[in-house]
Image (cartoon, grey):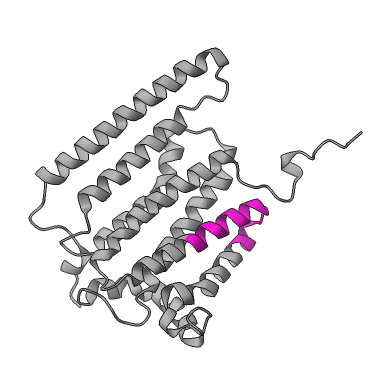
Amino acid sequence: MTAAPAPLAGRRFAWPTQRTWIDIAVLTALALIGLLGFAASFSSALYLLAGVGGLVVGTAVGIAAASFRLGTLFTALVAVAGYFAFGSGFAMPAFATFGFFPSAATLSGLAVGAVFGWSDIVTLAIPVAAPDYIGVLPYVATWAVGLISSTIATRWFPRRRRTPLSSFLALLAPIALYLASVLTGTGTPYFPEVRGVAFAAIALVWMAWRVSETANATLGSAAGLLRRKLVGVGMIVVVAVAGGTLLGVAAQPDHRFVLRDRITP
């Protein structure tokens, strides 16, 4: 007779479920939409390499920490170690050893850029190409968002009943990244209507789909539940696209609020 498998709570390693992977994918997509807002401030695609790299590092740390059931302290240590280990190649490749490995210059830039990059980007002329550590800004921003989002998806969601409030709280990190890219940008943002509609549609569809899930649905009511979900999701998409497009076209402000216009260098 074979021994019964150990209960999930007693295992040392727990791989994310399919539902958790969907949550991570949605939050990652929203973070990428927010990241694109930095295009208005940078002169090259360096911000994209840094931002995507930071998102990958932060998300990977969050998933690994939850899978190996690391505590808060060890998770923080691994996150900081990953930030400095991979940040050189993603945020400052020109100053990294062999283009990827950390050097004294990149380690210093990763520390300084995380603190002072926010003031530099709103006081320097656009497009921003200096100082050397300016690429750290999108890297640290997406690293933090990826870490927070993946931690919520892997640790918080599985232990709590899904409600509109809990789903909205998970959206706060991607929303903060979106707003940060707008406030540190210029009066001419990067495809604001398209990005705004896409962000709202994905977020609303995800919230509606997840909140409406019923684990105890019977086989007979499952078909009806699915139809209601599809109708509700379709209506949300239509409202998000139509409303976002109309507001984007009809309510164009003459002068957008950005921090660089309110700060004296």
Q: Quick check: is 87 in the magenta stretch? A: no
Which quadrant of the view contains residue 121? bottom left
Main SS of the magenta part reads: helix
Residue plotted at (34% across, 76% down): 134
Residue 20 left/right relative to 130: right
Q: Position of residue 170 (x, y in %)?
A: 44, 45
Q: Residue furthest left?
A: 254
Q: Can residue 184 be seen?
A: no
| First to last magenta residue range | 56-75
Q: Position of residue 215 (x, y in %)?
A: 56, 25
| In the rendered image, the vertical position of residue 47 relative to residue 157, given as above or below | below
Q: Position of residue 83 (x, y in %)?
A: 51, 69
Q: Nearer the viewer, residue 204 or 115?
A: 204
| In the rendered image, the vertical position of residue 241 relative to residue 94, given as above or below | above
The quadrant in which the C terminus is found is bottom left
Q: Residue furthest top?
A: 220
| In the rendered image, the vertical position of residue 252 relative to residue 235, given as above or below | below
The quadrant in which the N terminus is found is top right
Q: Position of residue 116 (x, y in %)?
A: 36, 75
Residue 6 left/right relative to 245: right
Residue plotted at (57% across, 40% down): 18
Residue plotted at (40% across, 69% down): 50
